[in-house]
Amino acid sequence: MEAVAVIAGIVAITWGAVVFCRGGLLGGCLAVLLAGVCFSVPFFKIELGPLPLTVDRALLALLIVQYVFWRRHGLADPKPLGKPEYLLLAFLAVLVVSTFTHDWKSLGTKTPYQPVAWLAIFYLMPAAIYWIARQTKITERQSLIVFGAFALFGVYLAITSLAEYFGATWLVFPQYIVTSAKDGAAEFDGRGRGPLLNPIGSGMLLSVCLGAALMWWPRLRRAGQMLLLAIAALLVAAIFISLTRSVWMGGILTLVLAVGLALPWRWRGPLLIGGLLVAVTLAITQWDNLLAFKRDKALSAQDTAQSVKLRPVLAAIAWEMFKDRPMLGCGYGQYAVESPAYLSDRSGDLPLEQGRGYIQHNVALSLLTETGLLGLGLFVAMLFFWTRDAWRLWRGAATPLWARHLGLLFLIVVGVYFINGMFHDVSVIAMANMTIFFMAGVTAALRPLTTENEEEVAK
């Protein structure tokens, strides 16, 4: 174990040095994000209390050192704080207070200190990435790095997921994806799980990568566009074999935004109407198949249909919990501890007992039950301003195309996040928050362009 730790440390330091010298802050953020997908806890970890040391967390520490160095030597591009940053700081303060004013140790559970670990992994680390990304000088070259990195990573994810699904294990990397399913009882076994071992998280990333790949279209000649279509088809196939309805919806939204918003107005109406007619036809003719189909090896089609019926049960539990603590919630990371007290309620028609052992399957309801209206309100307001800035970037007539495309990519990211978040608590899916916070930081770095556009319009 000591030898492995030394080797891992040398590799992390080497790559950190490469990123420090060549990639800049943006390259460091991408390295942390991509390492978090492929080389996190399932790949390698060193136990250090509630928060194990992994490759991506070591890279994040190096990135923070890099950021401090760049700030001290005037290499970063600091921007003044705006409404999204103040909302983010307030939201993080609510999460910290909510965590440490409740049973943050969770010593009587199977996962002690889980609230603290979740706070660090799912919010504090993404917030650090956001802070660093927004103080990066974004140019056309950096935008192409973002689009290219996501597109190439999407090809890797697609090949890995398809190889896993069709049993071509020699193509699967890392190999823990294969070994984790050998006992036949692994969660989501039978779907394209990817290195996250989660088809929802993998599918969300594939949708983002699809959106980033499509940003290359106007920059390519005919041969390049044909290759891009092949890559897009590969990513769509990988999204399909996630066998997850919300992931399919997120993939469709990606195509609608990436293609529909880029088309002239005269084309958008007919294509939108045609797409809606196709969607309605499929929903009418294939509704039963969409509700019940075999996707996991260990689950039947009836189990798949049952998952749809579980959502109203979990929503009813969340409503009862919200009524008792509307403003501050039951405490961040405390849902699993507090929700069993509501399962014996027989005043309604729903069998609440069916919700035992499940976390919330909705990102908004999860925040509402644990942090109340205060926490959810701050989170929604923060996302609203992030999305507004991205929309202004995309709609800026005088804004360079590369900057507009970064704004469009964030619109895709936030759309995919919330479509999947309607059916899953995506905030506790590895790298989901990291992705949206990173792209929000990139968009925030371009906020001065939206101000310039507004000044031009005013003139």
Image (cartoon, helix red, strand yellow):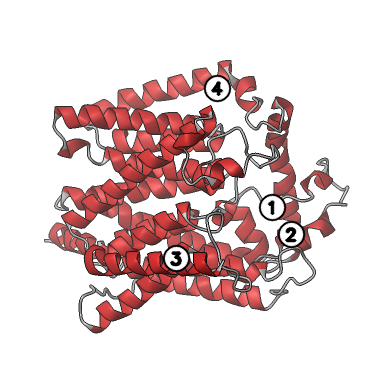
Q: CA distance from mark 1 to mark 4?
A: 28 Å
Q: Residue at x 36, y 38 (%)?
A: 155
Q: Secondary structure at mark 1?
A: loop
Q: Residue furthest left?
A: 459
Q: Nearer the viewer, mark 3 or mark 2?
A: 3
Residue at the disc numbered 1: 359
Q: Position of residue 83 (x, y in %)?
A: 38, 70
Mark earlier in primary sequence (3, 4): 3
Closer to the camera in the image, 164 or 314: 164
Query: Would you identify the image quadrant in which residue 266 lies?
Result: top left
Q: Amino acid at mark 1?
A: Ile
- Depth check, front residue: 447 or 102: 102
> Compared to 366, does 206 lie above or below?
above
Identify residue for label 3: 7
Horizontal and vertical percent for residue 406? 27, 51
Question: Are the residues at dot 1 and dot 4 in contact (C-beta closer than 8 Å)?
Answer: no
User: Does residue 53 show up?
Assistant: yes
Q: Point out residue 286 in the picture as x, y percentages from the top left corner.
A: 58, 18
Q: Element under label 3?
A: helix
* CA separation in Å, label 3 and label 1: 37 Å
In the rendered view of the protein, which quadrant contains the C terminus? bottom left
Q: Is residue 422 left or right of residue 278?
A: right
Type of residue at label 4?
A: Ala
Residue 310, image x, y percentages: 72, 40
How far is disc 3 from disc 4 in space, using C-alphas? 53 Å
- CB under 8 Å between callouts 1 and 2? yes
Q: Quadrant of residue 455?
A: bottom left
Q: Which residue is mark 2?
A: 336
Q: Earlier in the sequence, mark 1 or mark 2?
A: 2
Which residue is farthest front? 3
Mark 4 or mark 2: name the one nearer the start of the chain: 4
Relative vertical location of residue 398 with respect to residue 168 in this rendering, above or below: below
